[in-house]
Amino acid sequence: MAAAAEKLELRRDVTVWGSYMWGYADVGADIYAALGLVMLWAKGATPLAFALAGLVYIMIGLAYTELAATYPVAGGGQYFTLRGLGDFWGFVAGSALLLDYTIDIALFATASAGYINFFLPFIFGIDINSLAISIGPLHHVNLVWMAEALLLVIFLIALNIRGMRESSLLNEVLGVIDILTESSIIIFGFLFAWRPEMLAHQWLTQFPTLKEFAYGSSLAIISFVGLESISQAAQETKRPATIVPRTSVSLIFTVFIFATAFSTMSLGVLPWQEIAESVGDPIATLAHAIPFIGFIAGPFAAVLGATILLISANSGVMSASRLTFAMSQFHFISEWFNAVHPRFRTPYRTIIIFSGIGILQIILSFLTPNAMDTLGNMYAFGATTGYILVFIALIKLRFTDPYSPRPYKVPLNIKINYRGRQVDFPGLAVLGTLGISTILFEVILTHAIGRIAGPAWVLLCFLYYAYYRRSKGYPVLGSIPRNWEEEQLKVLEAAEEYDLLEQYKLALAERDRKEAVSHAQ
């Protein structure tokens, strides 16, 4: 009976490579899904759009590295914001990031199917666009492409219910192939096809308007969610305080190099219009244009795009399920979601429910003129909102939780005195807040769907949150009293970070000693 009543917890199965590939699955896929969309708007300034978005991404990545190593639990940005800013803002961050994860599933499954469709003309002699039909007032509805995307999501649901080890193995196997192939395309592209004079000509004569550039650069935010995936998997990662900083920092610079290299190479190989027109498979179009290897590089890049986008959608399923699992534990949503499969030890209810929302988003997006653009628009609002709150929480936690050991700290710290003790104020978090706030302003200014659907999603989630909290007698705008010090002790012990656990206990004991001396005087 005691064994049956014991609460089932998530299993720590993710290794160093598995943690790295969880992140790469998301951020490594940005160029395959975003290159055509960004180039459609940023035109000759596409490399600049990716570079500026990449600089903000680096700051976000470093912030997540510190927080995930300090608090290695499922929940990611939602948990960090809860710790720093309280229940209400933790819920807002969670609902915004949940919007991204469900769209992550929908967007990357749709994009993966798009790369698979690259082969239809060779196998069946048909083009996927020729299969679009009209349904009443709706035109160009591609039911075949939609069905393919839905089947991929159903496959990923089954995979994630079976367990993190199996799901992580898929990322690891496909990810290493993708990294090697992606590197090969860049190297051969620069050696045999890149013409710097074409890049300079398009920069000088095809520069976008300010509004177009803002629209395009904000779409590059698709690359940001990968590091959130690493933090979501922290509770299932072995020795997270050691592994998370190592994998996160490596991932940050890997993806930044790939994104800027692809966008720079593309404008020296083809006119931006050709890549923008191939929004479903831009990397395959680019690879096909490389001399000597194009006849094989094009199809191989299509396989590459399909696989990396599939594992990105896989990471979306994992992140959405772990985020909602954490939200149920902290009484943001019903405890019904806080259930682990008795055999596979995975949060099967959240996997099914929120992947189902991703399925609904796929269906609705295919009823619009351009499914990829619609999903990309919806994505931007949630990401920018969530990351602003994470930066603010990072700053707040430096003051309110100075005793938790931080195996990694973001750079650019300024030592200041606060209530009789010295605190490292994170200057980089201020720069990051300004950078991501600029992108949020771009989203609100230029994304018609994002500025409507994004706030509507958060509002609907809040209505559920308010109903649930009132029904349980919990404060709606306030916070439930929590013993965060006891929570942190349990987190470090569960993570087997015994050195950090001892450091934390000593820091708390020293604080208690000083307070006792102060009271005695």
Image: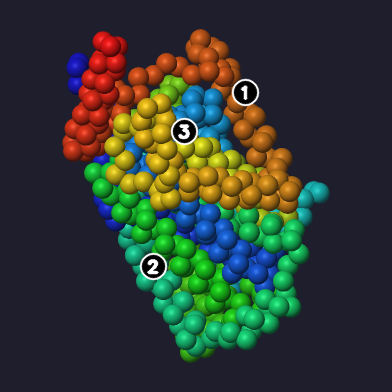
Disc 3 secondary structure class: helix
For disc 1, the neighbor class at 10 Å (few under 14, some 14 to 19, many from 20) is: few
Residue placed at 48% from the left, 52% from the top?
59
Q: Residue furthest right?
A: 137
Residue placed at 39% from the left, 19% from the top?
482
Does the image show residue 218?
Answer: yes
Q: Is residue 214 above or below residue 432?
A: below
Of mark 2 and mark 1, the one earlier in the sequence is: 2
Does the image show residue 101?
Answer: no
Q: Nearer the viewer, residue 294 or 70?
A: 70
Q: Tell me the CA gap for discs 3 and 1.
A: 27 Å
For disc 2, the neighbor class at 10 Å (few under 14, some 14 to 19, many from 20) is: some
Q: Tell me the CA gap for discs 2 and 3.
A: 37 Å
Residue placed at 42% from the left, 58% from the top?
252
Disc 2 secondary structure class: helix
For disc 3, the neighbor class at 10 Å (few under 14, some 14 to 19, many from 20) is: some
Task: Where is residue 359? Give x, y as percent.
Answer: 56, 43
Amino acid tagged 3: Lys
Amino acid tagged 1: Leu
Residue placed at 46% from the left, 67% from the top?
257
Instruction: Quickly name the residue at label 3.
Output: 396
Instruction: Quickly name the residue at label 2.
Output: 179
Instruction: Quickly name the residue at label 1.
Output: 463
